Amino acid sequence: MKSLKDIENEVARFNVNPRSEMRGKVFDEALELQRNRRRPSTSDTYTWRTIMKSRRAQFAAAAVVLLAICLCLQIPKGLVAPAYGLQETIEAHNSVRYLYVKGFIIVGGEKWDSESWMEFDEYGELRRFRHQAEQFTTGPIGPLTFVNDGNGSYIWLPNLNLCLKRSSESGFPSHLLQREISGLDPKLAFEKLRQQARDGEIVLDVNEPDQKNQPIVLVVTYPPESRSANWKKVLYVDQATRLVEKEEKFVIRGDRRQHVLTTEFFDYNQQIDPEMFNIKEELPENVTMIDQSEQEYGLAQGDMTDEEIATEVTSQFVQALIAKDYDKAGRLFAGLPGFLTEKMLGVNVLKTISVGPAHPDPDPDLSQMICFGKALGEVGGLYFEFDANIRVAPVSSQPGRWTICRIVGNPKPVSGEMIQEE
C-alpha cells in the first residue's frame, strides 16, 4: 500500500486544481456576491448546473474521484472532517437568545427595507419580537411596526396614528406579515429545509470552501414539477459558528433572474434593550387604539377546496366593496377595521368583471392561494379596469377560516362610456 507521500507526489504530477474545475458556477457567483465584488442585478442570467464539456474537465473529474477513493482508504476515519449538515446549523441556533435582522423585499420594482429584533427563551422558542417595515403596502399606509411583547401583539401605523391590538391568546394574523417575516427565524427555516430535503421537495447543493474565512454556501432549488420550480434560495453559513449570515431569494421569469429578497443576520446573542419590545411607551397620547382580540374574521372553509375557498373569499370581498360595506370587507381582509380597509384601497369599486381561478402561491415560503380578480372602479372621477392578484391565506389563530392578506392591483384607464356599456 502506497504512503501518503507517494500519493501526494502523484497528485502533484496531474497539475490540475479539482476544486476550480469542479466547483459549479452557481457557487462561484454566490461567493462573488458575498465578497461584494459585484451587486446582484435583476437582469442577470443564472447558471443552474455545471456542465463539463471539455475533455480536460472530464479527465480532471475522473482523476479527482480516483484520488479521493485512494485517500479515503489511506486516512484513518478519525482524522477525516465530516461534511457539513443542516442539523449542525439547527443545533448552533439552539443557543441563540438574541438576534438582530436586516432585510428588504422587492415589490413592484421597489425596494422596501425592514429591521427586526428577536428574543428567544431557553428552549429556542420566540419569546418577544419587533419588526419595522418602511413600507407595508402601496398607498397612504406608509411604515409599520409590529411588536409582540410576550403578552399581546400590536400593529402600529404612525401615518394613521392607529394601533391595532390583539391578546396573546387570539394572536395576530401572521399571514398579514407572512412575506416580510417568513424567514427571520433561522432555526425554523433550517428545520423546514431538513424536512424538505428528506421528502425530496428540494434540491440542495452545498459548497464548503477550503478557506475558513469564507462561508458555507447552500443553494436550494425545487423540482421541475413543483409549484416553486422557478425559485431559488442561496444561504450563507459561517464555517466556525455554523450560524446563518445571509439568505437571498431569486425567481426566474422568462430568461431573467430577479432578486426578490435579502435577509442578513447580525448581533447573535447580543442582549437587546427590553424597551424595544414595549411599544406602548412609544405611542402618542392621542393614538387610536383598537382591540381586535375577540374579533372573528375571514370565511369558514367548510368542505370547500383551497381553490374554492380562495375564490369565494375574493368574490364576497369584491361584492362587499361594491355595496360599500367596508366593515364586511375588512373582516374578509385580515380583520382590518372598515375605515382602514376603505383608506387602504382608495377605490370606488363599481362592477365585477370576473373572479378566479385560484392557484397556490409559487413562493416556497408562503402558504397562500392567489386568486385573480377583475373589476371596474373609479378614483377621483377617473375610471379604471383593475386586474388584481389577491392573496388568500389560512387564519393561523382561527383554524378552518381563510382571509385576504394582500392585494396587488394593476389599473388600466377606461372611458366612462365603457363603464355604462358594462
Image (tube, rainbow, N blue to C red):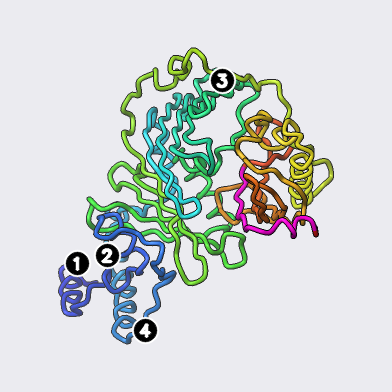
Looking at the rendering, the stretch of residues picked out in magenta corresponds to 406-420
Q: Nearer the viewer, mark 1 or mark 3?
A: 3
Residue nearest the viewer, comparing 15 with 271: 271
Q: Earlier in the sequence, mark 4 or mark 3?
A: 4
Label 2 is placed on what type of residue? Gln
Task: Work out whether 93 lies above or below 362.
Answer: above
Q: Earlier in the sequence, mark 1 or mark 4?
A: 1
Residue that badge 2 annotates: 74
Q: CA distance from mark 3 to mark 2?
A: 60 Å
Residue that badge 1 annotates: 4
Q: Position of residue 70 (x, y in %)?
A: 29, 70
Asked whether the residues under the numbered discs 2 and 1 touch, taking CB atoms below 8 Å apart as contact, a structural biologist would say yes
Q: Nearer the viewer, mark 4 or mark 3?
A: 3
Residue 50 has which mark? none
Disc 1, SS: helix
Left-right relation of 370 to 203: right
Q: Nearer the viewer, mark 2 or mark 4?
A: 4
